[in-house]
Amino acid sequence: MKTSVKHLLALAAMLATTASVVAGSITVKGSDTLVILAQKWAEIYMSKNPGTKIQVTGGGSGIGIAALQNNTTDIANASRPIKAAERAACIKNFGKNPREYKVALDGLSIYVHGSNPLNEINLDQLKEIFTGKARNWKDFGGPDAPITVYSRENSSGTYEFFKEHVLKGQDFLSSAQTMPGTAAVLQAVSKDKNGIGYGGAAYGHDAKVLKVKKSAESPAIEATQENVLSQKYPIWRYLYMYLSPDKDKGETAAFLNWVRSDEGQAVVKEVGYYPLPDGLREK
């Protein structure tokens, strides 16, 4: 009996799906803050599980969550919580509430040029600088020089977190120079003696990182692991991975469990972020 073309196509599709499952291919997309950590996780996990292929790309938290909604990534990395509208879009597009995993902690760092005499800054001062109300370093005990503000694009979770928690919802000054990623912000600040920027703790090696005060009267706090875990550092945050519950199985679930295991969390510390407290880890 002849096999119909329809049956052959169905068989081919089934074999392709089976091959994909066997290969353990996982796509991860989103936050530029998380990308260096996610790439390191992928590298180590693939070395321990040769049959698994993990592809990691950045683009920003908003880009990753949009890809999750459109079913073009398995996991979305985000440096801020998913928004209600994004959650609703996921439910509309794949019928279920996306599953959220906290995967690390970060102390959002404030970068200035190495020659800048400042060692600390408070949240009100940051708000003044990044909204454009203060435009000269002399207002903060620095040199008589204009402040150059470096920021992130609006698809960035770090941009949105900073706007919400530091600027209290106000807009960034219009002359802020928008950079495509945290590494670009850091590189720009490291070359600009009048520059200031912000980004994840793991990136701040080529510029001076300021201690941050909650208010003018508060102590200046460094973004150390102890201060972030105790929430003494005023601009700490969780880093997240989101996925459809339908994909939280097999190799993808195994990878997520490993990310939150003691071994995976040791990589967090190695990269420069902060491991989850024991209660949020997978044993």
Image: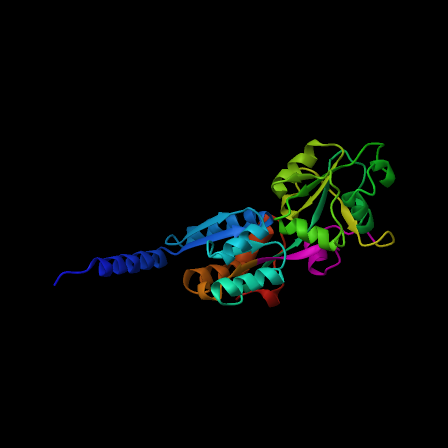
- Can residue 235 be seen here? The reply is no
Is residue 227 shown above or below 131?
below
User: Which image quarter: residue 181?
Assistant: top right
Magenta highlight range:
219-240
Q: Position of residue 83 (x, y in %)?
A: 62, 60
Question: Residue shown at 72%/32% (left/top)?
Answer: 192
Queried whether the magenta region covers residue 230, the answer comes back as yes
Camera-side residue of 79 and 108: 79
How many marks on residues? 0
Queried whether the magenta region covers residue 25, the answer comes back as no
Is residue 78 shown above or below 94?
above
Question: Residue shown at 85%/41% (left/top)?
Answer: 140
Q: Is residue 245 left or right of residue 18?
A: right
Q: Residue furthest left?
A: 1
Camera-side residue of 80 and 272: 80
Q: Position of residue 8 (x, y in %)?
A: 23, 58
